[in-house]
Image: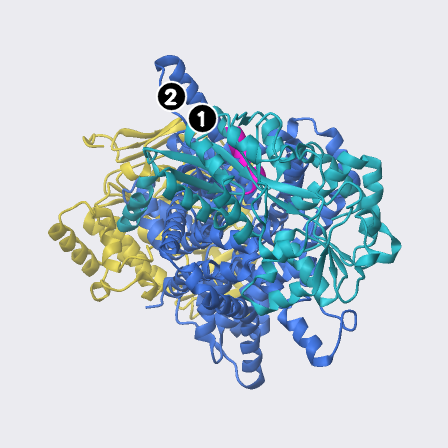
Amino acid sequence: MNKPDTTAPLLEVDRIRVRYGDLPVVEDMSFQLEQGRIGCLLGLSGCGKTTVLRAIAGFEPVSEGEIRLGGQVVSRPGWSLAPEQRQVGMVFQDFALFPHLTIADNIAFGIRQQAASRREARVSELLELVGLGAYARGYPHQLSGGQQPRVALARAIAPRPALMLLDEPFSSMDKELREQLAREVRAILRHEGITAVLVTHDQLEAFLMADEIGVMHAGRLEQWGSAYELYHEPGSRFVADFVGQGVLLRGTVLNDHQVETELGIIDGSIDPAFARNDDVDVLVRPDDIIHDDDSPMLTEVCDKAFRGADFLYTLRLSSGARVLSLVPSHHDHAIGERIGIRLDLDHLVMFRR
Amino acid sequence: MKTVLFSILLFLMPMFGSFALAAEVNLYSARQEALIKPLLDRFTEQTGIQVNLVSAKDDTLIKRLESEGRNSPADLLLTADAGRLHRASELGLLAPVESTVLEQRIPANYRDPEGHWFGLSLRARPILYARDRVDPEALSTYADLTDPRWKGRICIRSSDNIYNQSLVAARIATHGEADTEAWARGLVANFARPPRGGDRDQIKAVAAGQCDIAIANTYYLAAMLNDDQESERASAERLAVFWPDQDGSGVHVNVSGIGLTTAARNREQALRLMEFLVSDEAQRWYADSNHEYPVVEGVEASDTLKAWGTFKPDGINLSELGRYNADALRLMDRVGWR
Amino acid sequence: MTNSLARPFRLPSPWRAGVILTALVLALPVLTVFGFVFQPAGEVWRHLADTVLKDYVLNSALLLLGVGLGTLFGGVASAWLCSMCQFPGRRMFEWALLLPMAMPAYIIAYTYTGMLDFAGPVQTGLRDLFGWSYGDYWFPEIRSLGGAIVMLSLVLYPYVYLLARAAFLEQSICVLEVGRTLRAGPWTGFFRIALPLARPAVIAGLSLALMEALADYGTVQYFGVATFTTGIFRTWFGLGDAAAAAQLAALMMSFVFILIVLERWSRRQARYHHTSGRYRHLPRYQLRGWRAVAAFGLCLLPLLFGFLLPAGQLLVWAVATAEKTLDAEFLRLVWHSLGLAGAAAVLAVLLGLFMAYGKRLRGSYGVAVAVRIAGMGYAVPGTVIAVGVLIPFAWIDNRIDAWMRASFDISTGLLLSGTLVALLFAYTVRFLAVSLQTVEAGLGKIKPSMDDAARSLGLPPNQVLTRIHMPIMRGSLLTALLLVFVDVLKELPATLILRPFNFNTLAVRAFELASDERLAESATAALAIVLVGIIPVILLSRSITRARPGHE
C-alpha cells in the first residue's frame, strides 16, 4: 500500500467468497474500480452487498479469492490485513458517531497522530466542506438527522483514505433529504478525489451517486455496469426486473433481427444464441410505450399514478397481459378508458423463457 | 486512575517480605482476636517475642495448615475445643511437645497423652433453668431431659455448633451410639422451638419465658451477668445453673487448647508462649476476663463462677470428642436436630 | 443490520488465548473444589439424601424465590418511581435507596434479631405494655426462612434498583415518546415499553442478588435455616467429608446454571442496542396528592428497614461502646479494608473488561463458555472459594519450594499462600461476576458499528477499548468498580481464612465480636463498613445520573 501500483485498478475484488460458518453469503464475486470512480453495490437487503463492503474494509475474512487495494493483496483465504491498516474510510448505516467526543473531535479522530495545527486546519476545512462549521463544539446527540451523516462523512474523509466505503448512509432519511445528501456527498467525494464504494437498496441513490453499479442478488453479482447499461441492457431477468420499471412480454423469435410480441413485431439486434421459434420474454420499459390516440392498438387503463410531469399508466392488453406507459400529464384518462398506444423500443432485451 | 494504582501499590508493598523480625512466633487462633490479643500483648511485653496472629474458624485454620504443609508459617494452633485439636493431631499437623511445666500444670485428662495438644481453659455446658418456673429438685441428669414432662420447655442451639457436637460426641463415647441416639431423639421431642441463635439467645429465651430450660456454656451466662447493659444482666439473673450427672459421668466440659505445629520454625518461642499461657497470670486472665475455668489447679475461677459452686466434670479424655464428632453430627441429622 | 460480532473473524489470537487462560486460572478454585466430586462419598451422600438433603434443596429454592420476588419488586418499583416520576423527596431517594447496599447481610441479621427477638426490646415492650406473656400473642419469628428472605431482600434489592434505574435513564427518549403517542399511560408505558427494554439490566441485577443470596452463609447460619451453604460447611468440616461437600456445592451450582439457562432462553435472540441516539431531559410523570404520598411511602419502606433502622441501632450501640472500640488499631482496620476493597475493585474491573471485550471481539463458543465459568465464583460461598484458593496456592508454593530445595538447597517457603495476593485472587474469583455483568451490559449497549468505525479510522482493537468503549461506558465501569468495592468491604469468609498474619479488616472485627454475641461492641466496626460503603454508593448514584448522554 505504501507503493501504490499506478497501473493496477485501485480496488480489485477477485472471485471472492465469504461464508458465515457453513452459510455462504457471497459467492464468486468480482469487480474492479479505477482511481477516483464511485462504485455502487445495489441489491435487496440480505443479498450480501454489505458483506462485500465489510470484506473490503477488512471486517470479514474471505474464504476464497482475493481483495487487492492499489495492486496489493489485503485479503486472501487465511489472511487478512487488519481494518485499521487498510487506509479505508467507512460511513456506517447508523453513522456510529462517538457519543463521548465533540463533533470536531469525532472528525479529528482518524488524524489524531498529525500535528495539532495541521489537524485543526483539516478539521475546520472539513467542517466547512460539510457545512457544519458552527457545530464543532457540539456533541453528536445534538445534531439533526441530516447533520449526522455529514459528520460521519467528514470523519471518514479526514485521513484521506485511499478508498471510501458507504454502507446505506441515507437509508433512514426521507426522499428529499436523501437526494440532496447524495448529491452533496458525491460532490464532496469528487472534490477530494476519493474512490468510493456505496452500498444501497435504493436505485435512485445509486443512479445519483455512482459511476458504476453492480447489482447483487442472492450473494452473487448479477451485472456490473453504468446506470445506462443496467437500465437499457440488463444482463439478467433479475436486473431487468430490479432496475427501473418495466414488464416482460411474451414473444417468439422470428429471425436474427425480429421478435413477434402481442404489441407487434419488434426489430433489433438479437443475440445469435437465440434461434428461430424460441419462446422469449421481451423487456418493455414504460418509456418504450408511447401514447398515441391515432394508434389502432387499444388498451384499457387499469391504474394510473400522477407523477407531476407525467402519468404512469398501467395498461391491459387484449391478452390480459399488462404493460406500463409513461404519458405526459396533460393526457388525463380515466380508469377503464381505452387508449391507443404504439411501441418505440430502442434496445431489444429478451430472455429465454 | 494513576493515583489510585499508586496508593494500591503502596498498600501492597509491606505485605511482601515482612518476615524478618528477630524473635517472633506465629499463631493460628480459632479464638477471636479480642479474646486473646491482650494476653499475647502481655507475653510480648514480658519476653520481647512478637506474636503474629491469624484468627479464623477452627476447621478452616486446620484446612489452611494442612494445605500449607511443611512450609506453613504457623508455629502454633490454638482452638476453642479439644475435638479440633484431636483432628489436627490425627492429620499429623501437630508435633509432640515435652515440657515439664505443661505436664505439671495441666491435669492429664485435659491434654493429649502424647503431648500433641494441651488444654488451656475449661468450660462446662450444664443445664440452666428459670428460677421462677423450675424446681432444681426436679432436675437430675442430661438423660432426664428426655422425659415427657419437659415437652416444649427446652431451648438449645443448632447442631451446626461445635458445642452441641461435642456434647453428643462425649455421650457417644461414654454411652454408645444407640443409647445416645435415643437420648437425642427424646431431647429433640422436648424442644420448645426449632434451634436458632447462639447460646446467649437460649438464655434470653428462658428469661423471656419462651422455654424453661437451656443448655449453654457457662461463660455466656457469666458474661451476661457481668454485662454493661442492664437488660443483659436482668435476663441472666432469671436463670440458675444446675450441674447434671453429679452421681454419674459428670458435667460435659471442653477445653480451649493449643498445639505445636509440625512445621514450626520458632519452636523455642512457641514453647515459651505455651508455657506462658498456663502461667498463673494468664490463667487468671482467662478466668477474669472470659469467665472460663482455669485448667491449672490452684488458680481461682472468677467470682461469678465461684458463686455457682464446684462440680464434677466428665472425666473422659477429650480426644474422644474429636473421634466421635462426625458420628455425632450424623446422629443429630438422623434425629432431626437441625 | 446483522450483528457483526457473532461472525467468525480472525482475531489476533492473544486475546482469545488470554481470555481462556484467565478464565481457567480464575476457575481454579471452583475446579479444585469440584475435583472432590470424583472422590467416592457414597455412605455420607446416602446419609445426606436420607436426612437433610431435601431441607437444603427446599430451603434454598424458597430462599431464592422469596429474595427474587422481594428484590425484584423493591428494586424495579423504586427505580421506576425515581427515574420516571416526580414527587417530593425523589432527589433524596435517588441516592438514598442505594444505602442498604453498604449493609452486610449478617450485620442486619444480627441487628434485627437484637431488636425483634422474643427477648428483644420490641417484644418485651409489647409484653410490658399489654401484660402478655409467652404464648399470649403471635409475633413473626425473625430467625426463620421468612426472616432470612426479608433480611437478604432488604440489603440485596439495591442491585436490582441500581441496574434498573441506570437502564431506565438510558432509554432513549424517542422510545418513550413513541409510547406516549401510542396512548400509553404511565402504567402501560412501564409494563409494555420501559420494563421490557430494561429487562437485561433488571435480570443482571436480579441474578447478582440471587447469586449473593445463594452464597450467603452468615445470615442463614445465624437464623438456623438449613440451606446449601450451611450444609456444605457442615458436611465438609463437621462430617469431615470433602467429597460429599463438593457434591453439595455442585448441586447448588446447578441451581445457578438453571437460572442462567432460563434467562438466556427467555431472552433468546433479542438484542438491546439502542435504536436511537437522541436523548433529552426526561420529562417525568408529575405525581400529586395520594399518588405522591404512595410513591414516597414505597421508596421510604426499603430505605427505612434496610438502612435507617438498623444503622440507627448500630449508631446507638456504637456511641455506647465508642471509647472501648475506637483506637489507633481501629484506624488500621479502616485502612486495610479500604486498601483491599480498592485493589480488588480495580483488579476485578480490569479483568472483567478484558474478558468482556475478548468475548465481544471473538464471540466463539469456547470464549463465551470461558467467560461464563470465570463468573461462576459469585454463587459459590466464600468459604468454598477460600479453600479452593488455599489448596492450589499452597500446592504450587510447596512444589516450587521442593524443587528449589532439591536443585539449589534453598527453601523458598510459601511465596503466595498467606499473602494479600492470595486474598486478592480470592476476591477476584468471587466478585468477577459483578464487574463482568456490569461491564458486559455496558459493552452490549455500544453498537458494533462503533468498533468498526474506530478500526476503519486506524485504531487497533486494544485501543478501541481504551479510547472508545471505556469513555462511552464510563458509568458502567464506575458502577462495576464501586459494586466490587462495596462487596469486598463486606466480604468475610475468604478474608478470615486467607488473610496474612496480624491483618484484620472491619468486616472481620465486626463479625468476630458479633458472633461472640457482643453485638454492641461490634457496632462500631459494622457502622464503619456502612459509612465507608456509603461514600462510593453516593458517588455511584451521581455518576449514573451524570453518565446519561445528553445530560449536560
The numbered dot on residue B71 is: 1
Chain rendered blue: C
From what the image shows, is residue C510 above or below residue A220?
below
Inspect this view and state whether residue C28 appears: no
Which amino acid type corresponds to the residue marked 1 in the rendered image?
Asn
Chain ID, mark 2: C
Residue B94 x/y as whole percent: 54, 28
The numbered dot on residue C411 is: 2
Which amino acid type corresponds to the residue marked 2 in the rendered image?
Ser
Apparent colour of chain B: cyan
Q: Residue furthest right?
A: B148
Q: Which residue lies furthest to the front in this view?
A: B298
In this rendering, position of residue B135 left or right of residue C466 = right
Q: Which of C283 and A45 is in front in this view?
A: C283
Q: Is residue B66 magenta?
A: yes
In the structure shown, which secondary structural element does the residue marked by tag 1 occupy? helix
